[in-house]
Amino acid sequence: MTYYVYILKCADGSYYTGSAKNLSQRIVEHEEGLVATSYTFRRRPVRLVWAEEVPTHNEALLHEHQIKGWTRVKKEALVRGDFSAIDEIVVRERHAREQKKSRSS
């Protein structure tokens, strides 16, 4: 079975990250606004800007959770497929965490 992790760009410019077993059906659900309380409901139309196949439901949920924690800049690098930019962002984030930790010690 294949699962997907995906990023939508919403009409307000924000990004939504999700996972699904049937990606095309899930995109239609977002576009049709079937759930009034969902993040994308008031931000339609939405556009699929990135998706990745993963082999298990658990892996899809793990990737979704990881990407949801990313900054906008990091998500945009992923959408562009710019993995060197992602690496640079990770290095900067790690350096900032280390500096913050050393200041609080």
Image: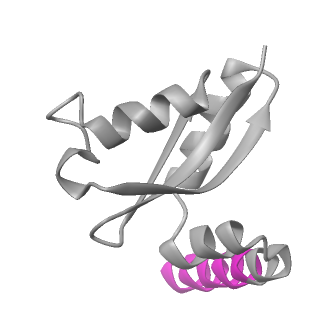
Quarter of the picture containing the N terminus is top right
Looking at the image, residue 94 sits to the left or right of residue 82; the answer is left
Q: Nearer the viewer, residue 32 or 21?
A: 32
Vertical placement of 4 versus 73: above or below? above
Q: Residue at x 79, y 77 (%)?
A: 82
Residue 51: x %, y % from top left: 67, 48
Looking at the image, residue 89 sits to the left or right of residue 43; the answer is right
Residue 10: x %, y % from top left: 35, 61
Q: Nearer the viewer, residue 44 or 63?
A: 44
Residue 54: x %, y % from top left: 78, 32
**Identity of the residue furthest to the top in this view:** 1
Q: Say which quarter of the image contains residue 13.
A: bottom left
Q: Nearer the viewer, residue 99 or 30?
A: 30
Q: How many labels, in total? A: 0
Q: Is residue 79 covered in magenta?
A: no
Looking at the image, residue 65 sits to the left or right of residue 54; the answer is left
Residue 15: x %, y % from top left: 43, 61
Q: Is residue 94 covered in magenta?
A: yes
Q: Say which quarter of the image contains residue 28.
A: top left
Vertical placement of 87 versus 32: above or below? below
Q: Residue at x 59, y 74 (%)?
A: 76
Q: Nearer the viewer, residue 66 or 8?
A: 8
Quarter of the picture containing the C terminus is bottom right
Q: Which residues are magenta?
A: 89-105
The chief SS type of the magenta part is helix
Vertical placement of 64 versus 83: above or below? above
Describe the colour scheme in one phrase. one colour
Q: Residue at x 58, y 41 (%)?
A: 64
Q: Residue at x 56, y 79 (%)?
A: 73
